[in-house]
Amino acid sequence: MSRSRAVLFDFDGTLADSAPDLAAALNGLRAAKGLDPLPVEAVRPFASMGARGMLRAGFGLTPQDGEFEPLMDAFLAHYDERVCVDTRLFPGIRELLGALAERSITWGVVTNKSSRFTGRILEALGLSPACVVCGDSTPHLKPHPAPLHLAARTLGIAESQCWYLGDDLRDVQAARAAGMKAVAVEWGYLNPDNAPPHAWNADLLLAAPQELLEHL
């Protein structure tokens, strides 16, 4: 693979483990409706789908259901209250970011998560990426390549010199469509709707963050 000048990360399930706070917001909504809480592990596989995944896990709802929009607003209000209480970087990520800095490799975030939350979480985690592209930064969400194209333009780096890491099939599809190196990771949430990561046709499959350094 060509040498990387930039490494871009998906957020939920790749850079940070936000499932505990997403689950807490969901359980706050369930409690308001007289329902028992769900364990974090029951919710975790749906966390890469964000609020949409939480409503599916907690209520079996899809965007086509009439209750979806009002419950979405209520869920986001709960999440807004505790957006980074128990969210943490995945083990090895902080060390990887430090190693990228030592090699003068730029890094950034491209996520479908709203900017309403993403910036606050990054600040709470003490992170300063060179670019942050959120779900409301372009008219399109991943797997559309528009967010990745915007990140490359922001960095002033050609797509062919960018690698994109993600824990969802959509991340690999977006990277390929954008002309970036597609890197699938195995430590994330692994959406149950997807085939296993080895079947995503990624350029590289990582079991742990530090493995990326062997390929840069």
Image: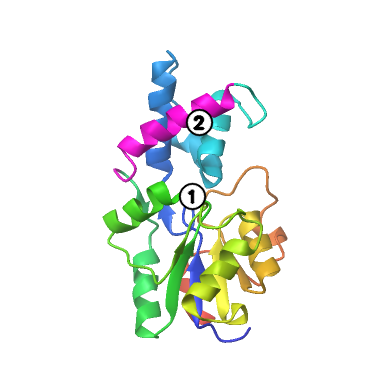
Residue indicated by mark 1: 113
Give the main secondary structure, helix, strand or loop, of the magenta stretch.
helix
Mark 2–mark 1 distance (CA, rounded to whole Å): 14 Å
- Describe residue 57's horizontal placement relative to residue 62 as left or right: left
Image position, residue 46 (x, y; %)? 55, 40
Q: Nearer the viewer, residue 99 or 152?
A: 152
- Describe residue 111's horizontal placement relative to residue 174 as left or right: left
Image position, residue 190 (x, y; %)? 58, 49
Residue indicated by mark 2: 72
The local crowd at label 2, few if under 14, some if 14 to 19, many if 20 or more residues have their Cα within 10 Å, is some
Whether residue 83 is in magenta: the answer is: yes
Image position, residue 148 (x, y; %)? 58, 66
- Describe residue 63's horizontal placement relative to residue 73 as left or right: right
Q: Nearer the viewer, residue 193 or 142?
A: 142
Q: Identify the residue at image location x=34%, y=57%.
A: 122
Query: Going from the N terminus, do you reach mark 2 or mark 1 first?
Result: 2
Q: Identify the residue at image location x=38%, y=68%.
A: 129
Residue 45 tag number: none
- Give the SS element for disc 2: helix
Image position, residue 203 (x, y; %)? 66, 72
The magenta segment: 67-85
Whether residue 172 is in magenta: the answer is: no
User: Of the residues shown, which amino acid type is indicated by label 2?
Assistant: Met
